[in-house]
Amino acid sequence: MMPLHGRTTVIGLAICLALSGCFLNPGPLLRSGPGRIEHVIIVMQENRSFDHYFGVFPGANGIPMKNGVPTVCSPDPRNGKCVKPFHDPSDRNYGGPHAHRSHVADIDGGKMDGFVAEQLRDVQRKLRPSEVNVRVPNVMSYKTEADIPNYWAYAKNFVLQDNMFSPVASWTLPVHLQLVSLWSAKCKVKNDPMSCRTEISWPDPTPDLHVFGRTKPFPKPSYAWTDLTYLLHEKKISWGYYVHKGMQADCEDAGNEDCENLPQGPKTPGWYNPLPFFTTVQQNHQVKNVQSVSNYFTQAADGTLPAVSWVIPSAEVSEHAPHLVSAGEDWVTAVINAAMQGPDWDSTAIFLAWDDWGGFYDHVVPPVIDEMGYGIRVPAMVISPYAKKGYIDHQQLSFDAYGKFIEDIFLDGERLDPKTMSRPDPRPFVREEEPSMGDLMNAFDFNQPPRDPLILPTNYKPQDGG
């Protein structure tokens, strides 16, 4: 279905050509390929590696095998044995620590064999001895189509990206800062963007984050550098950041797998909801754009979604270990169904990914492009009426490609570049211009007619949580 303004533009252009001499600024649907996308939806789940979810997906760069048996392994310090990846159909899994320290240990200088040792270290440090054998070496487990049927259905019918790396070699807060601003930093002076410097491990924590031995909450951070919403607001492009009400999906202690989660919602800024702490969002009076996921479902049905949407889960539907995989898959399916069944499906691109590896095994050594990373490889998909059918995209990518796609579609290619943006900051790199990063446009075929929705079953209902 062509949006109304698209039909109007076509008619207007025809009249102009007939009259010979009038000028008409072409609307979005008259641009080359990317102009067909008027709505970008980024769904960001939690803590799974590519090999854990798609390591045995046909045609993908999955777990190295010979005659159906993995040829890779990770040593178990308890017995000297090397644990090969194994199938685990369990709905509840136990990942490993996933702070920067664990990222370095898991990679082990390129050997990609530190996963079991890191999980064991974490379990021995934080849990009862009886839990050790229950959880270790669960980080070496992988899923099959029977375990995550909807995700495999999306991969088979749309685009699976088997070379997508988390943008930061670290945990959730740096990754989510990177997701909305293409940088993770620490600022010395409140509201002063020029005082910010790159920080991969410990950006200013949000008040909801607690660490062992600290009794007082952290002060409110000042994320003073420039983010994507600033450029969008400057060009009058609408955006929304949708937060699922529930409990936060990560622990109070960064990298821990077991803790009492804290409440989460659009009015509780945190490490999954950092935008309200950005100076730009506050000064532009855009905090109201951070809203409940229930609004997303309403707007998707009404055809009133903004141009750019980020959709963020709560713990219960995040897939963050040890939360149920099925609950997250059901929720994601409901989010995607809503977009597919709404009136804007024909002009929508959905990017689905998992923010970091969560301690789970992956065999691919992540590239190092700068001091931020990349992080370990994660699952990612492109779902759109213009997505290629059953295509596996082998390009090297990171979440920075999402920012570049948004900039190309809605901002005429303007970048978060200190040399060109009206609100400069001292970021040392323009991640969108990384030469080794692929182009998300490769996932689309704009010559094909819009594909029909793929509505999949789900037990999640929008009223289950907002």
Image (spheres, helix red, strand yellow):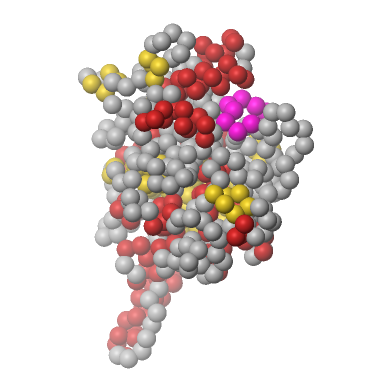
Image quadrant where residue 280 sits:
bottom right
The C terminus: image quadrant: top right
Magenta: predominant secondary structure element? loop
Q: Position of residue 185 (x, y in %)?
A: 57, 50
The N terminus: image quadrant: bottom left
Q: Identify which residue, 13 or 360, lies in the foreground.
A: 360
Q: On screen, 144 above or below 287?
A: above
Q: Please indicate whether residue 146 sits to the left or right of residue 391 in the image.
A: right
Q: Position of residue 199 (x, y in %)?
A: 56, 45
Residue 29 in view here: yes
Q: On screen, 189 above or below 455?
A: below
Query: Residue reaching furthest left?
Result: 67
Q: Residue at x 44, y 8 (%)?
A: 79
Q: Please indicate whether residue 302 sits to the left or right of residue 252 in the image.
A: left
Q: On screen, 219 above or below 96?
A: below
Q: Identify which residue, 5 or 126, lies in the foreground.
A: 126
Q: Please indicate whether residue 27 sits to the left or right of residue 307 in the image.
A: left
Q: Is residue 35 magenta?
A: no
Q: Position of residue 379 (x, y in %)?
A: 40, 38
Q: Identify which residue, 34 or 336, lies in the foreground.
A: 34
Q: Position of residue 220 (x, y in %)?
A: 71, 48
Q: Residue at x 49, y 16 (%)?
A: 136
Q: Residue at x 47, y 62 (%)?
A: 417
Q: Which residues are magenta?
A: 253-260
Q: Residue at x 67, y 38 (%)?
A: 209
Q: On screen, 273 above or below 450?
A: above
Residue 462 in view here: no
